[in-house]
Amino acid sequence: MAHAKSVPVLMHHHVSPSPGMITVSPENFESQIAWLAADGWTSLTMQQYAGFLAGAPVPRRSILITFDDGYLDNWVHAHPVLQKYGMHAVVFLVTGWMGQGEVRPHAGQQGAAVPVTPDHRGCEDAIFSQGRADEVMMRWSEARAAIAAGTFEFHCHTHTHTRWLRQDISREEKCAGIRGDLVRAREELHRELGEASDTLCWPYGDFDEDYVRIARELGFRYLHTTHPFGRNLVGGDPEHIYRFAIRNRPAKWLRKRIASSYHPLIAPFFNRFKAHRRGMLAGP
């Protein structure tokens, strides 16, 4: 059996019928997930992915599907599609935005009216301006239901999603802020889900040497970026995991994107060219 030498990592935020930035429609999301399943791709757990980086074999067509923040639409619209096709994904939670309450209906449940899932700007307005995060974010009960169903697992995206590098504060205050954010997030994950892993995703993709040092000191080993132009290879750097954002397009786009950025001959040129054009860091 052939084993993977590289594993693409997909970055989502919203799956919702409300169009807008960083949002994939339920139809296009299902098109992409259905293609992955039909084409023989294995959606890895984070533990399997960590093993891959360390040299453990995974199937040749392996992929890691990630979601940032933990919006309600992940439960309402992405969860039933993942369940339908037997696929698995990772959610990086902003623990301070999570609430309590009953599990809400998701798409595909007969006789149940699903909650409205606003676009990204609507979610931001509800969270930051109106104090109504519960209306747009997943609840802890829904996270536990998704874990039980096998569709999602949950990891750290800080507690407050603060952009500490953009704050007009001293280096010492910045370091104290990110440290406290990470400590509190792990405490919440432990209390609500029973565990907190060694996996972290940087909010907004912001990090520097201080961030990495603090994360390492707190026991985080796997650090996910928003850098899209690089391949995650066997033996690659677990503290700099490349992810590329998913567009609101059908499966044909995803197939081409993976082929361009992960083909062993094409990818180095594609990633270097794209990174150069955007002034970003390019990987192997």
Image (spheres, helix red, strand yellow):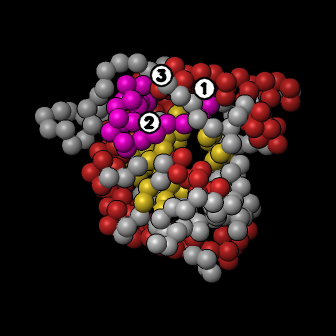
Per the rendered image, the range of residues in magenta is: 136-160
Element type where label 3 sits in the image: helix
Amino acid type, residue under disc 3 in the picture: Glu
- Dot 3 alpha-carbon crowd within 10 angstroms: few under 14, some 14 to 19, many 20 or more: some
Question: Does any portion of residue 117 appear in the rendered image?
Answer: no
Residue type at tag 2? Tyr
Could you tell me how far apart the alpha carbons at marks 1 and 2 are, in whole angstroms?
Answer: 16 Å
Foreground label between 3 and 2: 3
- Viewer-closest of 48 and 127: 48
Residue designated by label 2: 71
- Residue 155, given in percent of the width and then of the height, sits at 54, 36
From this view, report whether residue 260 is shown above or below residue 80.
below
Q: Identify which amino acid the numbered label 1 is placed on.
A: Ala
Q: What residue sits right under mark 1 in the picture? A: 185
Say if 230 sits above or below 141 in the image. Answer: below
Along the horizontal axis of the image, is 107 left or right of 49?
A: left
